[in-house]
Image (tube, helix red, strand yellow):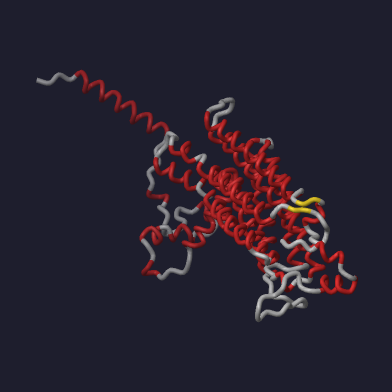
Amino acid sequence: MEDLSFINDLPPAERQSWLDGPALNPPKNAVSNFANPPNKNDLAYVFAIFTGVFCTLLIALKVFSRFHYFRKILVEDAIAVAALGVLGAYLWCMWTLALNTGAFVHQWDVRLKNLPHFLYYMNIGSVTHGIVMMLVKTSILIEWSRIFVPGGIRNRFWWTCYITAAITVVFYITSTFLNIFMCNPRQKSWDRTVPGMCLRIGTVYLVTSSMSLVSSVMIFILPQPVIWSLQMSTGKKLAIAALFSLGISACIAAAWNVYNCSRFSTSEDVTYTVSHIGIWCTVEQLCGFLILCLTTASKFLRESSWIRFLVSKCRNDSKSGPMYPQERSVSHRLSAPNRRRKQRTDASLFTDTDRADLLPLSTINVQTDISIRANSINAHQMDKTFAKTEFP
């Protein structure tokens, strides 16, 4: 971004003219629109609300399931809750930018004096995004080391998970440090009229997004060899591999963000290009939370009694419906009297017959206990006689 510290040396009237003017000269055949610039604020609001609600439900389901099945909260659960809190800060920055400057607003439609407000929340959003992804990926790796490795064992997969987690933490702490202290003084990160020096923010974003893509690909590949080495049928292996292959969604979001950051590094229209980065950072975070909670949530959804009840009820409702008599199956016609049967009254309990579909009680031969024993004794004596008989 251009250094604007020179306007501090201008006369007050000329300086005010610069501040009231556009933050970027408009292209040919374009006129600055400060009053109501074209924007996509509704898109930003929808992404912020959906991501916040969906990720909150995922974490709540994860924590509830863990406590329901194991009666304890693990380290990765606490990290996931912390990630949700930092995600709230990121979404707040996103909401504030859309509410004030606007999302997908060209920089020539923003006054220069309003640009620091946009850059300030952009900087905070960049810092919080790195912290969210660091916590999410660390929690994923710790949980996978617990899922695929029996307790107390330190095999190659366990060490790979923890080494990858350590590298991820170091990388994101470094990128967070760069985002915070990329300018000296720090105020110049959002106020370009302040004298000082800055790193190229586009280069910082591009390197950060590229390393984020590498770590996402590593996390996606990591469990696949272990899954295919499990002693189970091929169908179950495919099902588990497909479940953990949802990580490809995070890889796609990270790859697209690399492309957006490359555009940002060569563009002067900061307010517009960074909006693309913000939306796809939100998608990447959403995919990360989904991967983080898929194992615990899938177990809960698969084994929960009330979930099974709802599924069975929906299936029954979908199968039931108006049927013509000629379309009814044989089993449906045979079971019809039982479905039409009304509740018995006290008087009907003592009658020989109840309905046409029941057997008459008078046709049933009832043997007493004495007659049954007599028959069994006679049969036993006949067996003895038959055994003593000699055949020629």
Between 51 and 261, the one lying in front of the other is 261
**Percent of width and height locating residue 94:** 72, 60
Residue 53 position (above or below residue 133): below
Residue shown at the point (37%, 68%) measured from the top left: 327
Q: Is residue 353 left or right of residue 135?
A: left
Residue shown at the point (76%, 48%) measured from the top left: 181
Q: Residue furthest bottom?
A: 29
- Counting the numbered discs, the total is 0
Q: Is residue 328 left or right of residue 154?
A: left
Q: Is residue 340 left or right of residue 172?
A: left
Between 286 and 326, the one lying in front of the other is 286
Viewport quadrant of the C terminus: top left
**Percent of width and height locating residue 345:** 56, 56
**Percent of width and height locating residue 365:** 37, 43
Tell me, yes or no, if residue 132 can be seen here. yes
Tell me, yes or no, if residue 346 can be seen here. no
Between 103 and 49, the one lying in front of the other is 103
Q: Residue furthest left?
A: 392
Residue shown at the point (82%, 64%) measured from the top left: 6
Viewport quadrant of the N terminus: bottom right
**Percent of width and height locating residue 322:** 46, 69
Between 31 and 300, the one lying in front of the other is 31
Q: Residue furthest right?
A: 12
